[in-house]
Structure formats: C-alpha cells, structure tokens
Image (spheres, rainbow, N blue to C red):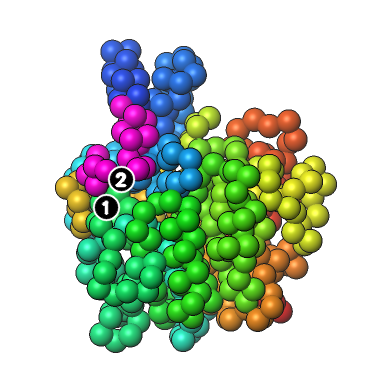
Amino acid sequence: MRTSTPNSPHIRGRWRRIGSAAAATAALVLAGLGSAAHADAATADTHKVSARTIAAQVAKAHVRYENACAANPKKGYASCNALRVTGGTTAFMEKQAALKGIAPKTVKPNAASDDPTGYGPSDLQSAYGLTDAASSGGSGETVAIVDAYDDPNAEADLATYRSYYGLPDCTTDNGCFSKVSQTGSTTSLPSADSGWAGEESLDLDMVSAVCPNCNILLVEAKSASDANLGTAVNEAVKLGAKFVSNSYGGSESSSDTTYDSSYYKHPGVAITASAGDEGYGAEYPAASRYVTAVGGTALKTSSTTRGWTETVWKTSSTEGTGSGCSSYDAKPSWQTDTGCSKRMIADVSAVADPATGVSVYDSYGSDGTGWNTYGGTSASSPIIASVYALAGTPGSSDYPAQYPYNAAGTSALNDVTSGNNGTCSTSYFCTAKSGYDGPTGWGTPEGLDAFTAG
C-alpha cells in the first residue's frame, strides 16, 4: 500500500477497508481462490457472497487494484477516485500480446513495470475520435487539476510520461506547467501525500494524453476537506483556467447547495467531476448542477468501424462507476429525464475500469514507483475536461454541462447501451440503455461536437 501522512483525516477509513479486504482474500486463498481482486474480497467480507460468485467476478475483472486515497472519508471530506492496478492482466497487455502472438504478462504488486501496461495517448485519442483535434488543437487553453496535498514529483513525472509518448515538453520553464497551493502560492505548498500523488499523476497524464498542446495548472488543496478542495477550484478559476477537473467525491449532504454557490458556480468554465467508484449511488461534487458529472466505462478494442466498444464499468457490487438521483441538488433546466426530480448523475462518461485502465507514470511513494495502470472515474474526469479544452473556450455565460445535452442522440456521442453498476428501483438510474442513462449519461465523446456551444 502507499504510505500517507499519518494525521491526514482521510486515512483511517482507507486502512480499515484494505484490512477487511485482506481478511477476505485470506479466506479465499484457503478455498483455492487466492487470485481474488481487492474489490471482490471486500464484497465477500461485507455481503458474504459465495466463493464461486467472487471467483466468477475475478475471472471477469482480470485485475487486482487498490484505492489510492481514502476509501471511507469522514463527513466533510472527499476521497480521490483513483484505483491503481496491483496484479493481473490489463486489456492493453492482452492487446499487445495478441499483436505479438505471445502469452500476456501480468502486473506484479508493488513492482511497477519498466514499460506502460495501460492505454496511452494514441489509444485514447483513437477511441474518442480525437486524433486530429489533439494534434492541432488546445494551444493557449489551460486545464486545471484540483487535488489534495502535494506531489513533490509532479513535474518530473509529467516530463517522463510526455517524453515516453513523444508529446511536447510541458514545464514550468516554458510556461506550460504550473503548480500552486489553494491560495495561489508556488512556494508554500501543502504537505506531501503519496496516495494523492498517484491521483495527481493520473490527472496530469490524462490531460497530456488527450490535449497535449494544452497548458496544465495543478492546484493543491491543503487537505481533502470539501471546503479546501472547493477553495482550490475557486483559485483555479481565478488564475484563468476555463477547464477544471475534480477527480474526487464524498457523500452528499445538506451543505451541498451551499457548496454549489460558493465553489462550483462558475459560468463560462467547464468543470468536470468524477461520478465515483463504489457502484450505484450519488456523490458530491458530481451531484452539483453546475458541473459535468462524468461516469465510467470499460473500453476494449473491437472489430467495429469505430474499432472500440464500451460497456458500463462494474467490477462488483461495490466497485464500479457511480450514478444516481441526488437527494439535495436541484435539477438543471437542460436535464429532462422524468424519473428523478432532482439532479441526475451522470452527464457523459469515459474509460474508468481498471481492467481496461490507462498508463500513468508516478515515482512518489514507497510502492508502485514507475509505470502503473490506473482506473476509476478519476481517469474519466480529466479526459472529459480535456475534450472540452480541445473544443474551445465556453461561452462566457454558459454552463458547459449543458453542451452534451444539445448533442444528445447524435453521432457526436458514442451511446453506451450495455451493463449496469448495481440494482435500483428505477432501471435507467443504474442500467445502460439506448439514449440517456445514469451510469454513462449520454455516452462518450466521438470528436468535439458534443462539447462546444456550437
């Protein structure tokens, strides 16, 4: 596991979750099922499902992974939604092995690979119809990443990722990259945390992959409290970012409508937020009516004209993309589904399944140093923020969350029609279908047309 600042308020829940998963995994080993995924072991501990059921889930998932940050943050705090693969074989590794006609290798726990084991820039650009736009667009636009705590190696790791994939340099010296605290300071930064550092590497690499010509602003909150993260969002906007990604979330509360107006109400700015990684259920700030809530898919190559296929990401009953009907946030005017009287999550989606995860370079911490594969809706949020950036600066009075709704049902979005993220009383809240559904919204990008005012 990653080491973290012992006094960080979000840590206690994370260690409990990992511990219960370990206990369940030990039981499976005795049953001859020692390859169980972390997520499925947690399911066994909580729901006491049969070993055979878990084995079937594991065989389907192919990978084991761990939560990079807090699994169960306390009230008023958020967890990052980054999941680091620690074992098994990813879709990218299977693809590479098939091309070479060899047996696929496996990821080894706490021993990152010398080479990428997840999807890279060309894969993501191809999957979402962005190859030409990524090559020619994005110059002059700034995508802001908001996370908690400091990643001391953020710029160096970003340089390694971009160099490997032949992307343009993005450094402090050339003005492309900047890192500040929630107050805008470049020198007085928060304490370091290796769990959140992995999240920051994931976010920076996804911006690089989708919009390699964009500038990147990393704003580090001093803690994972909702107030500090929200303050960091305000700072990002104050510093001029028109695209802000938030790869974190926590339980909804009656305070959310206040947070909406204090932190996330920024007309003319595309703000994205992860829908969550614990399956069906609403999270905040994805529930804010002012953000684009981003769900997660499993992305695999196919023989279709597109060359790719997607389903709802679900690993187990407690691991998969979030979705749902908010308990507190009002429904925005452009959202017209009739089953939920308040804000419905999600709006759009992108790859998030760790088994079909993305390549990330991260060197801060005692484990997983080097190339890793990450999943979670922490991957999908910065991907979508970067698509908005490629599409151009939003209208000054617009809330860009509306843009995909203007393109609903058109070829500008890949409609995801299969899979679910749990059980629910209103089917589309948790089950994919033609048109709008909770887990994937209106679908995934196919070019830029769904992310511009038109």
Residue at 46 percent of width and 21 percent of height: 46
Disc 2 and disc 1 in contact, CB within 8 angstroms: yes
Q: Quadrant of the C terminus?
A: bottom right
> Residue 188: horizontal and vertical position, in percent?
26, 69
Q: Earlier in the sequence, mark 2 or mark 1?
A: 2
Q: Position of residue 200 (x, y in %)?
A: 35, 60
**Which range is magenta?**
1-19
Q: Is residue 168 above or below residue 5?
A: below
Crowding at mark 2 (Cα within 10 Å: few <14, some 14-19, many 20+)? some
Instruction: Please give left or right for residue 106 compared with residue 420 in the image.
Output: left
Q: Is residue 271 left or right of residue 415?
A: left
Q: Secondary structure at mark 2?
A: loop
Local secondary structure at mark 1: loop
Residue 228 can be seen, yes or no: yes
Of residues 73 and 91, the one nearer the viewer is 73
Q: Please indicate whether residue 424 sits to the left or right of residue 321 in the image.
A: right
Return the residue found at the far left: 366
Residue 340 falls within the magenta-colored stretch? no
Label annotation for residue 193: 1
What residue type is disc 1 on? Answer: Asp
Residue 19, picture quadrant: top left
| Picture quadrant of residue 85 | top left
**Which one is in front in this view, the residue at disc 2 or the one at disc 1?**
2
Reply above or below: 113 against 143. above
| Residue 439 appears in view | no
Q: What residue is at 50 percent from the left and 74 percent from the top?
A: 237
Using the image as rendered, state which of residue 288 and residue 382 is in the foreground: 288
Q: Which residue is mark 2?
A: 8
Structural distance between the alpha carbons of marks 2 and 1:
9 Å
Tell me where residue 392 appears, x and y as whole percent.
58, 81
> Residue at the location (24% across, 56% down)?
192
Count of numbered labels shown in the rendering = 2
